[in-house]
């Protein structure tokens, strides 16, 4: 099947890119064929995050998102930072980069479902329940598209009566929006050498639950971040508690996967976090509604690969745009999708490229350098500062100095 743009992954980045492409075409009364494939059974099924999001990129796509019914119902109203000992929750100064004024506490899964609906309304072809199994390369080494997995195969890899072979989706541009540690992206980065030698991504693991709590204990719009217990001073990580609408609370624990203790279990640490008196008092009398876990990128600007290659680009968390000190990545994921869409639209529609030679989206990386990279560069030394013999104590001291006064203006990384 032939398309102008093939997008692998139906998350915030992939859907933002598809929407932007169709909006640009509609504005100029042009045609551009866009397909999004998503391995989840439905759009949003594999989306999990805190989440408290910045709405800037959403407003770029839909300035009237409130009138259109976007599921952003609970504005962030109050920020707190706590240091947990085994029995107490001590107030801490709130880092300026973690301010959530103007942000919204959301179910990111619901936001992504809504974006999927908007993309379909604009004419984007969306294939949920479809996993990309391999990348199709042209004879010149450029990316030509992807192939989907075969369906109707038994666990012994034998064809069943319902067997359906996978199909190839070819595009003038292929955007990879697989999220953290995507399988195709890993192979692509290695094959095309998109990372410098010695450059690598670092990861964390986030575990989350959504609770319905006693209305008397619920404070809509309240946001709490924690450090300390149950993690020791050598282990990077922290907890979060977000008060959503309808007496719901989203809480979780994120642990950097560079922890030194080989016996540490992030899941068990999360159980200890919930057993802390500060958290237990909130949850008592409530009930769990849902739970999940996900990996997240923590490398920041030092770990960004080359973002474009002949025939496509990397967008969203697959490239690693999470701002770790902010504990946010959705806004950068959507922004990257918008920037990549603008670059692809210009190449395909405005410049008429892609027929005889592969498209190279070099201006996409330039646009990222002027926007997302600047945000990540300013906080580039915050996460590494926790990886010293002083542990979280050294990290907190440096982070406070860097984010409040230096603003990344130091001659080292």
Image: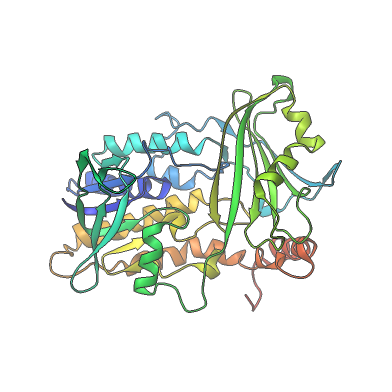
Side of 202 relative to 163 (left or right): right
- 411 relative to 270, above or below: below
Q: Nearer the viewer, residue 339 or 303?
A: 303
Q: Quadrant of the C terminus?
A: bottom right
| Count of numbered labels shown in the rendering | 0
- 54 relative to 71, above or below: below
In this view, the residue farthest toward the left is 356
Identify the image quadrant of residue 244.
top right
Task: Please report the residue visible at 37 percent of the width from the left and 53 percent of the height from the top.
Answer: 338
In this view, the residue farthest toward the right is 87
Q: Nearer the viewer, residue 334 or 160?
A: 160
Side of 75 relative to 152 (left or right): right
Residue 303 screen position, x and y as percent: 52, 68
Task: Please report the residue visible at 65 percent of the width from the left and 72 percent of the height from the top.
Answer: 409
- The type of colouring in the image is rainbow
Q: Nearer the viewer, residue 188 or 74?
A: 188
Residue 167 screen position, x and y as percent: 20, 50
Task: Please report the residue visible at 70 percent of the width from the left and 28 percent of the height from the top.
Answer: 219
Q: Nearer the viewer, residue 197 or 150?
A: 150
Residue 240 screen position, x and y as percent: 67, 43
Task: Please report the residue visible at 39 percent of the width from the left and 71 percent of the height from the top.
Answer: 190
Identify the image quadrant of residue 396.
bottom right
Side of 147 relative to 1 (left or right): right
- 133 relative to 278, above or below: below
């Amino acid at each position: 099947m032939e398309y102008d743009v093939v997008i692998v992954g139906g998350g915030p980045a992939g859907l933002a890119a598809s929407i932007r492409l169709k909006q640009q075409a509609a504005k100029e009364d042009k045609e551009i064929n866009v397909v999004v494939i998503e391995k989840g059974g439905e759009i949003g099924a594999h989306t999990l995050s805190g989440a408290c999001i910045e709405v800037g990129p959403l407003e770029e796509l839909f300035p009237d998102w409130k009138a259109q019914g976007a599921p952003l119902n609970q504005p962030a109203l109050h920020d707190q930072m706590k240091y947990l000992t085994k029995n107490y929750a001590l107030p801490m100064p709130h880092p300026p980069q973690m301010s959530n004024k103007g942000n919204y506490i959301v179910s990111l899964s619901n936001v992504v479902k809504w974006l999927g609906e908007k993309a379909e309304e604009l004419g984007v072809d969306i294939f949920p329940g479809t996993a990309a199994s391999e990348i199709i390369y042209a004879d010149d080494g450029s990316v030509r598209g992807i192939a989907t997995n075969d369906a109707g195969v038994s666990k012994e890899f034998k064809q069943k009566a319902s067997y359906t072979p996978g199909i190839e989706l070819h595009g003038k541009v292929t955007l990879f929006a697989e999220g953290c540690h995507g399988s195709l992206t890993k192979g692509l980065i290695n094959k095309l050498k998109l990372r410098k030698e010695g450059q690598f991504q670092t990861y964390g693991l986030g575990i989350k639950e959504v609770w319905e709590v006693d209305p008397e204990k619920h404070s809509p719009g309240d946001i709490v971040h924690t450090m300390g217990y149950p993690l020791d001073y050598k282990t990077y990580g922290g907890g979060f508690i977000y008060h959503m609408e309808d007496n719901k609370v989203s809480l979780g624990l994120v642990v950097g996967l560079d922890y030194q203790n080989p016996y540490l279990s992030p899941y068990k640490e999360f159980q200890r976090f919930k057993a802390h008196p500060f958290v237990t008092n909130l949850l008592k009398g409530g009930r769990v509604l849902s739970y999940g876990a996900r990996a997240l990128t923590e490398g920041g600007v030092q770990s960004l690969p080359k973002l474009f290659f002949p025939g496509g680009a990397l967008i969203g968390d697959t490239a690693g745009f999470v701002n770790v000190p902010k504990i946010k990545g959705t806004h950068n994921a959507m922004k990257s999708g918008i920037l990549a869409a603008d670059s692809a639209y210009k190449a395909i529609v405005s410049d008429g490229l892609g027929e005889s030679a592969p498209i190279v989206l070099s201006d996409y990386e330039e646009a990222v350098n002027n926007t997302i990279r600047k945000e990540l560069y300013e906080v580039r030394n915050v996460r590494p500062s926790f990886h010293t013999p002083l542990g979280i104590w050294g990290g907190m001291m440096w982070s406070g100095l860097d984010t409040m006064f230096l603003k990344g203006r130091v001659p080292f990384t």
